[in-house]
Image (tube, coloured by chain):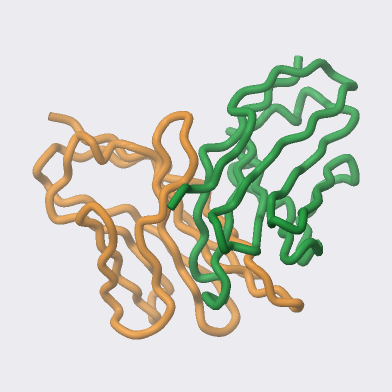
């Protein structure tokens, strides 16, 4: 089965500093990887995805992620953090099902806190 | 284009009761998936419907069921509610032709079982 791991429950960063939220994956075959963000009492908002191609993926709100096959990682990054980036971030992998279909397996989430 | 709409947003039910949650996908999307989010278990896949057929199912007891209508709207039902069913239930829809590479989530229904 496909899985992703987010080793940090919380990441604290000062506004203006670069941020990294870590994710590692375990898949059979080629991975379809995603990052989502969740604000309090809200659903998930799509940030970016890696399917194939360039290892550096650019997404919404200035976020980007680097796919590293040798390290089986897909870390989320932003060059300059904003207080408004404070939220819960989820890494996910598309879980390939025998009959096809759209099932995502999520990591446990990382709470990002950006302080002034 | 309207997003994924889930109703109701909040719900309080008593143990033993049943509940039905509704999800209207983005127009043109035929795949609808349901997820349960709890502090202890995180985000867990419940099931997916495509063209009125259940295509995938997660590891939840039979008390959890769903269906999809011809207009792609979906409902999920939980019978004989337990305290542990208290959660945020999220619905996601996916457009055709993307091979599951895009999922758009609704704001969720917060279910509290007392």
Return the x and y of residue A76 as percentages of the image width and height: 31, 59
Q: Is residue A94 left or right of residue B51?
A: left
Q: Is residue B16 left or right of residue B102?
A: right
Q: Is residue A87 left or right of residue B47?
A: left
- Residue B16, by quadrant, is top right
Return the x and y of residue B6 as percentages of the image width and height: 60, 38
Camera-nearest residue between A110 and B7: B7
Which residue occupies 78% across, 59% down?
Answer: B57
Which residue occupies 20% across, 56% down?
Answer: A62
Return the x and y of residue B41 as percentages of the image width and height: 64, 41
Query: Which chain comes out green in the rendered image?
Result: B
Q: Is residue A93 left or right of residue B17?
A: left
Q: Is A52 placed above or below B32 here?
A: below
- Residue A67, by quadrant, is bottom left
Q: Is B98 placed above or below A106 here?
A: below
Return the x and y of residue A34 as percentages of the image width and height: 44, 63
- Residue B15, by quadrant, is top right
Residue located farthest toward the left when viewing the structure as drawn: A16
Q: Is B55 placed above or below A6 here?
A: below
Quadrant containing the C terminus of chain A in the rendered view: top left
Which residue occupies 56% across, 41% down?
Answer: B5
Q: Is A75 placed above or below A85 here?
A: below
Quadrant containing the N terminus of chain A in the rendered view: bottom right
Which residue occupies 19% across, 34% down?
Answer: A83
Query: Which chain comes out orange in the rendered image?
Result: A
Q: How many marks?
A: 0
């Amino acid at each position: 089965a496909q899985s992703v791991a987010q080793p940090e429950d919380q990441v604290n960063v000062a506004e203006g500093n670069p941020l990294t939220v870590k994710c590692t994956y375990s898949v059979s075959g080629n991975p379809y990887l995603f990052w989502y963000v969740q604000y309090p009492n809200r659903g998930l908002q799509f940030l970016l995805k890696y399917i194939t191609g360039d290892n550096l993926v650019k997404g919404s709100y200035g976020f980007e992620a680097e796919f590293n096959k040798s390290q089986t990682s897909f870390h989320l990054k932003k060059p300059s953090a904003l207080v408004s980036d404070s939220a819960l971030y989820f890494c996910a992998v598309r879980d390939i099902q025998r009959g096809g279909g759209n099932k995502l397996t999520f990591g446990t989430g990382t709470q990002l806190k950006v302080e002034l | 284009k309207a997003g994924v709409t889930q109703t109701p947003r909040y719900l309080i039910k008593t143990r033993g009761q049943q509940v039905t949650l509704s999800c209207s996908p983005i127009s043109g999307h035929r795949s609808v998936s349901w997820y349960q989010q709890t502090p202890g278990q995180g985000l867990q896949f419940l099931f997916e419907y495509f063209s009125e057929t259940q295509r995938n199912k997660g590891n939840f007891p039979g008390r959890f069921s769903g269906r999809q209508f011809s207009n792609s709207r979906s409902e999920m039902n939980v019978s004989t509610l337990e305290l542990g069913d208290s959660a945020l239930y999220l619905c996601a829809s996916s457009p055709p032709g993307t091979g599951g590479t895009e999922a758009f989530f609704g704001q969720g229904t917060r279910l509290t079982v007392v």
